[in-house]
Image (spheres, coloured by chain):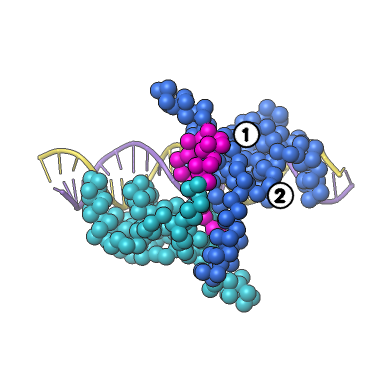
Chain colours: A blue, B cyan, C yellow, D purple
DNA sequence: GTTACTGCAAAAAGTTTGCAGCGCC
DNA sequence: GGCGCTGCAAACTTTTTGCAGTAAC
């Protein structure tokens, strides 16, 4: 969720696209606004039940799909499966902690633009997009892993 | 599969790691050596049956896991699901056609190295790796799409 | 002769769909 | 009041696991 938006703004923008405002959708939006980590779908579901106990998994899937299509959340490919995290403002890429899945965003490398142009002329491909992620361990997790806990 | 390796070389390297040479594994290796596209697991399975008709899906999964761990094949995240393609030699990244899933590899952007160092000092993350892919349409598919088909 | 490997089938995990009732606009 | 949305359950897809027979070394 663009971290510069609040609950009302997101719901309003959804409304502009014809999506009704419901307690279930509000719950999912709250969850995504309130996380600094990439979440698996079942984690989104669990957290959403705090705001709307009777929400179902299907609704979570459907709402995440809407939010993704509107550009409010994004998928991250972390190891085994994919996770969702709020889309930050600007053209940035995620740096994901492989242990706690906290996401740190960094500014898009502007060399990718020229690389894209270069690739298009070299290969004849018509490029539609790219995927850039870094993986590692955040300072906190790194310390804890060194401490033998792992 | 590293395109500069042949069947014997791959099987030999697997043997070095203690993996036995079997018809099923040979079939999967042949499939991966013979593709220029990223394949879904069921596509690998279908093609493998040409070499070894009684092969099972479970064996395909198990063999792809071995090949991935040894670095002979890689996953690509293309839209809906992930696909496997042979690891090319050198440090390169995939440019994937969204229609036919042909993979064109390009040389790793060396600016990523300095970006990594920059990110580590900025964020405190200990970076383990990165994921860079471009998506688009190859010239052939682009022409066919313009032609009104699709 | 051992032990790793296989194919099969069943289980598990992840995701989508159908639908009747509810509640948003 | 109409229709979009929901939760539930069932279906479906993808991946993993258990196991007894088979074959590689």
Does residue A122 lie above or below A101 as drawn?
below
Residue A60: image quadrant is top right
Q: Position of residue B111 (x, y in %)?
A: 51, 52
How many numbered tags mark residues here?
A: 2
Residue sticking out furthest to the bottom: B147
Q: Is residue A11 left or right of residue A136?
A: right
Residue B133 included in the magenta stretch of the image? yes
Q: Position of residue B89 (x, y in %)?
A: 37, 58
- Magenta stretch in the rendered image: B115-135
Residue drawn at (69%, 44%) of the image: A89
Marks 1 and 2, the one that precedes in the sequence:
1
Q: Report in which chain the residue with disc 2 lies.
A: A
Q: Does residue A116 appear anywhere in the picture?
A: yes
Residue B4: image quadrant is bottom left
Query: Observer-nearest residue: B6 or B51?
Result: B6
Question: What mark, if any, has residue B121 been given in the picture?
Answer: none
Dot 1: what SS? loop
**Alpha carbon separation for disc pair 1 and 2:** 19 Å
Question: Mark 1 highlights which residue?
Answer: A36
Residue A52 included in the magenta stretch of the image? no
Question: Mark 2 highlights which residue?
Answer: A70
Q: Position of residue B68 (x, y in %)?
A: 37, 49
């Amino acid at each position: 969720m663009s971290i510069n938006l609040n609950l009302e703004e997101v719901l309003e923008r959804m409304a502009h696209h014809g999506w009704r405002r419901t307690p279930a959708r509000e719950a999912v939006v709250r969850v995504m606004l309130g996380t600094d980590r990439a979440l698996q779908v079942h984690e989104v579901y669990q957290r959403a039940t705090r705001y709307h106990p009777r929400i179902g998994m299907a609704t979570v899937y459907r709402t995440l799909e809407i939010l993704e299509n509107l550009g409010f959340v994004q998928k991250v490919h972390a190891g085994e499966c994919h996770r969702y995290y709020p889309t930050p403002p600007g053209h940035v890429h995620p740096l994901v902690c492989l242990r706690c899945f906290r996401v740190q965003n960094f500014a898009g490398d502007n060399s990718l633009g020229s690389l894209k142009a270069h690739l298009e002329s070299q290969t004849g491909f018509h490029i539609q997009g790219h995927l850039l992620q870094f993986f590692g361990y955040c300072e906190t997790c790194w310390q804890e892993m060194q401490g033998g806990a792992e």
